[in-house]
Amino acid sequence: NAGVTQTPKFQVLKTGQSMTLQCAQDMNHNSMYWYRQDPGMGLRLIYYSASEGTTDKGEVPNGYNVSRLNKREFSLRLESAAPSQTSVYFCASSILTRVEAFFGQGTRLTVV
Amino acid sequence: QQQVKQSPQSLIVQKGGIPIINCAYENTAFDYFPWYQQFPGKGPALLIAIRPDVSEKKEGRFTISFNKSAKQFSLHIMDSQPGDSATYFCAASIQRGNKLVFGAGTILRVKS
């Protein structure tokens, strides 16, 4: 089983450029999440989707948008990248009635 | 404002030692407290979790101690091994919310 797959693994953007981070899970999970990881800050929730067709803001949503394309896929879009968005981004998924989250391997994004 | 405070930031122990990582929380609505382990270049993975109706949970060499009145919980790693060297995150959630709030992380190094 692939679990949670994120693409790309690495990306460098110039300030003002846009891009979409892709995430897909093959575990038939209902809920999906986007986190960012920064040194000394732990993981902070950007957006989540409790179930297909719904999305909601997390702790740090500014500068991001999401789309729950179907049950398997949840994408994160940066419309106009800023250096403050340099981070490692993790997608995760979980079964609705249980809280254990399964994480992808991350996307390391650098905005210059 | 970090809802879950984790300490220390980093920890070095000798092989066979017992590293202890501590976390504290404020929100009394939290009812699920997992610990995640992350190796370099990988996403976090669930290590062990506890609910507030028990004071201790053991899984192999890993033990969570939970003090509900003090709103604190900790991870102990018995007979630590170099392979345990990783970053450890405590987290908390309200079960039905399916959203995890993470501590800042502890970088553990076990010297052989």
Image: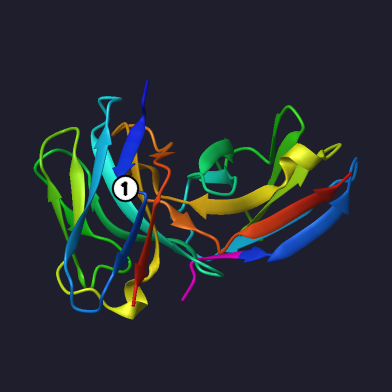
Q: Which residues are magenta?
A: B1-5
Residue at image mark 1: B97
Q: Chain of mark 1?
A: B
Q: Is residue B65 above or below residue B103?
A: above
Q: Is residue B33 magenta?
A: no
Q: Is residue A59 left or right of residue B25?
A: left
Q: Secondary structure at mark 1?
A: helix
The x and y percentages for residue A4 are 34, 35
Q: Amino acid at mark 1?
A: Gly
> Could you tell me which residue is drawn at 27 percent across and 78 percent down?
A82
Residue A109 seen in render: yes
Which secondary structure type mostly characterizes the magenta part of the structure?
loop
> Could you tell me which residue is drawn at 25 percent across and 25 percent down?
A28
The x and y percentages for residue A51 are 18, 39
> Could you tell me which residue is drawn at 72 percent across and 63 percent down?
B10
Q: Is residue B13 left or right of residue B6?
A: right
* Image quarter in which the C terminus of chain B is found: top right
Color scheme of the displayed model: rainbow
Residue B67 seen in render: no
In front: B1, or A105? Answer: A105
The x and y percentages for residue A90 are 38, 51
Q: Is residue A74 above or below residue B29?
A: above
